[in-house]
Image (cartoon, helix red, strand yellow):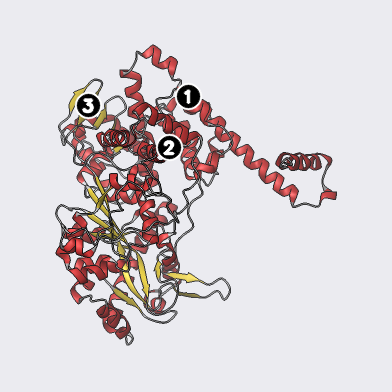
Amino acid sequence: MSGMIPQSFIDDLLDRIDIVDTVDSRVKLKKTGKNYSACCPFHDEKTPSFTVSPDKQFYYCFGCGASGNALGFVMDYERLSFPETIESLARVAGLTVPREVQTEAQIKREQERKSIYSLLEKADEFYQQQLRHHPSKHMAVNYLKGRGLDGKTAKDYGVGFAPPGWDNLIKALATNDEDKHLLIEGGMLIHHDQDKKLYDRFRHRIMFPIRDIRGRAIGFGGRVLGDDKPKYLNSPETPIFHKGQELYGLYEARLAYRDLPRLLVVEGYMDVVSLAQFGIRYGVATLGTACGEDHLNKAFKYTNEVVFCFDGDKAGRAAAGRALDASLTTMADGRTVKFLFLPEGEDPDTLVRKIGPEKFETMISMAVPLEDQLFDTAAEGLNIRTMEGRATFSKRAAPMLDKLPKSVFKELMFENLATRTGLNRNILQDLIVEATKNPQPKQEPVKEIAHTPTKPAPKQIHIQQAIHPQDTQNQIPRQHSEDPGWSDYYDTDAPPPNYEEYYSGHNSRSVVEKASPWKNANSRMLMTPAQKAVALLVATPTLAVIEPNHDLWLEDTDTNLLMLGRLLKVLHERPHYNISNLLGYWRGMYGEDETERLAKIAGNDLLQATSALSTTRDDTEAKADYDNQAAFKGCLDALYRHQNAKKAAAHLEKIKNSNFTQLSKEEREHLVRAALANKTPQQ
């Protein structure tokens, strides 16, 4: 059945179904106060942290962060698409799903996505055929044989060959202008602005198809044959490919195991493929970017253990630091993160061939747990026998632990830190507050340590230690560095703007965070004013009347402000919407990823705030202590101050670039005041 499902039907369906009944028919719930609870179906746990609110028609897991409405729960639990979920819930409610005619723009956009998927599948087939039949195939075949790759593994992972030449793919697939346009949109062709010509993005490279969780080719990675740069080239961001969210090899790993024992995050495609050839089929790789929170959240949907595997050099140490930081916010109870450091000069591809899969898996089992890696990192370069060393160690470690979500693991980590330092929890909490007010400068690489630290040597695993675990005399110490890691080897997109700097200098937190239960009790995410405003709107949709100007935020390029504008717009048009309606609308309008992002922002605080207002004090005292209307106004004040500051800065820049003699009196005075304000006093 074609056509869009009307939003009015989705709203009506959500009004008819009850999230408690929907969840309880799949996961047995137990009433706990106003809400219901159970062990989370999306991660392993023994103590229930999964909560369902009948009032909000919303679920949230304090352990793994899963959240959403009844639609989202059924989609994730039964792994259905959005239309399939609507059909399933409609049958339960005794309803027939209607369809409405799509607009031309909607039809064109959806058809374009389908066509890109189709063309990338054809490109995948083309590259695999070239590896078998192209006259220059011997270059690729010899390279793969030299790396020890057999034909079966290459076929399983769809390894192919992009021949030398500028237009091989164009000749094969771009039969008309529409195909050329779609191949450009899909990242396979590049339009040269100067000579107005098209050419293949991937040339003279070993090709690795990047597949989504359904097995569809959504992009490619290419390893150069020869000395051209970059060594590794990935598809750019496209309508169907977002490198910050994808893991190469995840689809193949899920095919190989009914229950994934773990995921081993390695550096490159060949590492993944080589490990698979030796029976270690749970390797995955990020696509030229550091492993981030989105990668980890995706990984933890399919396993409870993630092991990072790094080269034992300076770049590997720096990459481990970034991975550690990204891991902290995802460390719910029942999850495990480890760090495996290989001897210098080795990578998974070479090492597994040298020592074999059994000994390599022994090394994996001996990887450094996150807790040890965290304390090793915090103690780097310090002599913690001294009071000064322990003080610095505490100041480094406490803010890191504060990033952990509320869990038993977090409490145990703080107990561990208290034991190591002799400080109680209250003092450690003060250090966290101090670190928030006065961020520490970035730690410089340690070139020389004046005192011998008492902490054990970093736990890098030597080959001989894997072969004979009882023999640790040959252990190689890890190196310390702030080097940029793997990014030099990849064609990467520029990082997004630093949202932390977005509000610098505006002192916007005083109104919003004062005595507020929205201050992330589980420390899952430090929220910006825009995110706080979104969370408050989702919890209390009537706040939308305070800000009638949604168009201002819809024009902004910042994703959080755009979400705020969209949220205000829909609440102005549909003031009766509750959180369940909003999430249903969001999924239909903006897709699954944006809906998950909205649910995450709301879920981080929604049930915590509800709990704080209903269980820790009576309603009168709670409302006196926390006024969400004042908090929302505080967010808007901060946002408008920033908008005004941006306009003022743009105006000042325009004046600076103008001829001084042609400026008006007011503009000259403005320029002089700005110059005096920025003048540093003489010492």
Q: Position of residue 587 (x, y in %)?
A: 35, 43
Secondary structure state at the residue bearing disc 1: loop
Amino acid residing under circle 2 = Leu
Of labels 1 and 3, earlier in sequence is 3
Q: CA distance from mark 2 to mark 1?
A: 15 Å
Q: Which residue is mark 3?
A: 36
Q: Give the residue pinned by disc 2.
A: 526
Image height check: is 521 above or below 166?
A: above
Helix, strand or loop for disc 3 = strand
Q: Nearer the viewer, residue 58 or 389?
A: 389
Considering depth in this image, is 627 or 505 the residue closer to the camera? 505
Quadrant in which the C terminus is drawn: top right
Q: Is residue 430 left or right of residue 637?
A: left
Q: Nearer the viewer, residue 683 or 275?
A: 683
Q: Earlier in the sequence, mark 2 or mark 1?
A: 1
Give the residue number, with chain letter if any, for mark 1.
Answer: 514
| Secondary structure beneath label 2 | loop
Q: Is residue 111 visible?
A: no
Q: Quadrant of residue 36?
A: top left
Three-letter amino acid code at the position of disc 3: Tyr
